[in-house]
Image (tube, rainbow, N blue to C red):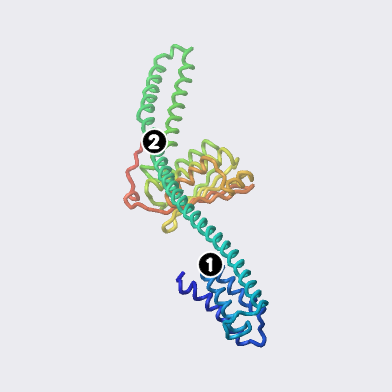
Amino acid sequence: MNPWVLYGVPAAFTMGVLLVSHALTGLVGTATLYVLLLPAIVYSALCCGVGPSILTVGIAVVGAKYWFIPPVHSWRVPETSQLVSILAFMVASGAVVAMAEERRRYNQQLRQGQAELECRVKERTVELDAANTSLRDLSARLLRLQDDERRRIARELHDSVGQLLAGLSMNLSAVRTDIDRLTKTVTTLADSEALVQEMTKEVRTISHLLHPPLLDEAGLSSAVRWYTDGFAQRSQIKVDLDLPADFGRFSPELETAIFRVVQECLTNIHRHSGSPTAKIRLRQFDSQVVVEVEDEGSGISPEKREEMASGGTPGVGIRGMRERIRQLGGDLVITSSGTGTVILARLPAAESSSLAEGLPVQGTSIAAA
C-alpha cells in the first residue's frame, strides 16, 4: 500500500473524530471522546500496522489534551485525574495495537500459506493434465496396434492355415473315393472330413470376426449386414438392422470404431441380457454419425448401474467402447432398466469421398462370409 495512504487514512479518521467532537463540545465529554477515538485506533492497528497506529494514538492524545482536557488550548500539565485518564487511554490503546498487530501478522502468515498451497495445487494440476494427455495418447496407440495385429492375424490365418486345411480336405476327399472297398474306415473318414470342414469354417469365422475383409473392401454397411446375419444364425437372436441404403463411407478409424461398438453390444446381449431380440439403428445427421443398439433383456443390474453412476470401473467391453469413441471425439450414453438396455453412441462424421466411390469387392471374400 502507498505509505501516504497507509498513514494518511487513519490520521484523517482520527482528526475527523476530534473535529466532530470539538464541534459538539457541550455534548461530548472526555470519557466519550476516548470511546469515539477507540475505533480509529482499532482500524489503524488491524489494517495499517504499528507505525500508523502509534501516529493515531499520538494525534488522539495531543488533540484530546489541547481541545478537551483543562486547561484547554494550553500545553500545561493537566491535573492528576486527567493525567491518569490519559495514561489509561494510552495503555488501553497500546494493548489494542499489540493484539491487533499479532492478529494481523497471523493473518498475513495464513495468506502466505494459502498462496503457497494454491501454487502447489496449480503445479500438481499441470502435472496431472500432462499425465492424462500421455495416458490418452498411449491408449490411442494401443487401440491402433490392436487393430493392426487383428488384421495381420486374420490375413495369416486366411493365407496359411486356410490353404493347408483346403489341401488336406482335397486329399481326404481323394482318398475317400479310392477306399470304398474299405467299408470299415468309410465312417471314420467321413467324420474326419466333416471335422476338417468344420475346422475350416471355424477358422474362417474367427478370421472374419477378428477383422472382417468386407470392412476394408466394401465398407461399413456390408460388414455390419454380414456380421448381424451371421450373429442371428449362430445365437438364434432376432436382429432388426435399420441401416439406410445410402449410408456412405467414412475414414477407416471411424468405420472400425462403429463396427466394434456394434460387435461388442451384440456380444453383451448374447452373453448377459437374455433378450430374444436386438435392434440396431445407424444414422448420419450432417456432421454426426449416431449408432443405437437396443435389447429387451433383463438390463444391467442395479448394483452395476450404481457403481457406474458413482464413477466405478465398468466392464472391459464398455471401457473399450468408451475409449474408442472418445479418441474420435464422440460420446457414449448407456440407459438400462429392468425391461432392457439402450446404448447410444455419437461420433463426428468425416466422410471420405474417395472411399465412397468404393473399391472392387472380391467375390471370394463375400463367398467366405
244 w.r.t. 160: above or below: below
208 w.r.t. 251: above or below: above
Asked if the residue at tag 1 contacts the one at tag 2, i.e. Cβ–Cβ closer than 8 Å, the answer is: no
Residue 116 screen position, x and y as percent: 48, 55
Disc 1 target residue: 50
Q: Is residue 38 visible?
A: yes
Question: What residue do we see at 44% from left, 57% from top?
Answer: 285
Q: Quadrant of the C terminus?
A: top left
SS type, badge 1? helix
User: Residue 149 bears which disc, if any?
Assistant: 2
Residue 248 screen position, x and y as percent: 39, 51
Which of disc 1 and disc 2 is earlier in sequence? 1
Judge depth for marks 2 and 1 and give the one in front: 1
Residue 69 screen position, x and y as percent: 63, 82
Q: Nearer the viewer, residue 204 or 293?
A: 293
Question: What residue do we see at 50% from left, 54% from top?
Answer: 117
Task: Please give left or right for residue 13 compared with residue 154 in the image.
Answer: right
Q: Nearer the viewer, residue 83 or 339?
A: 83
Question: What residue do we see at 42% from left, 41% from top?
Answer: 143
Dot 2 surroundings within 10 Å: few (below 14), some, or many (20 or more)?
A: some
Q: Nearer the viewer, residue 209 or 330?
A: 330
Task: Please give left or right for residue 59 compared with residue 243 in the image.
Answer: right
Dot 1 surroundings within 10 Å: few (below 14), some, or many (20 or more)?
A: some
Q: Is residue 297 visible?
A: no
Task: Please give left or right for residue 18 compared with residue 223 in the image.
Answer: right
Q: Amino acid at mark 1?
A: Val
Q: Amino acid at mark 2?
A: Glu
Residue 359 screen position, x and y as percent: 32, 45
SS type, badge 2? helix
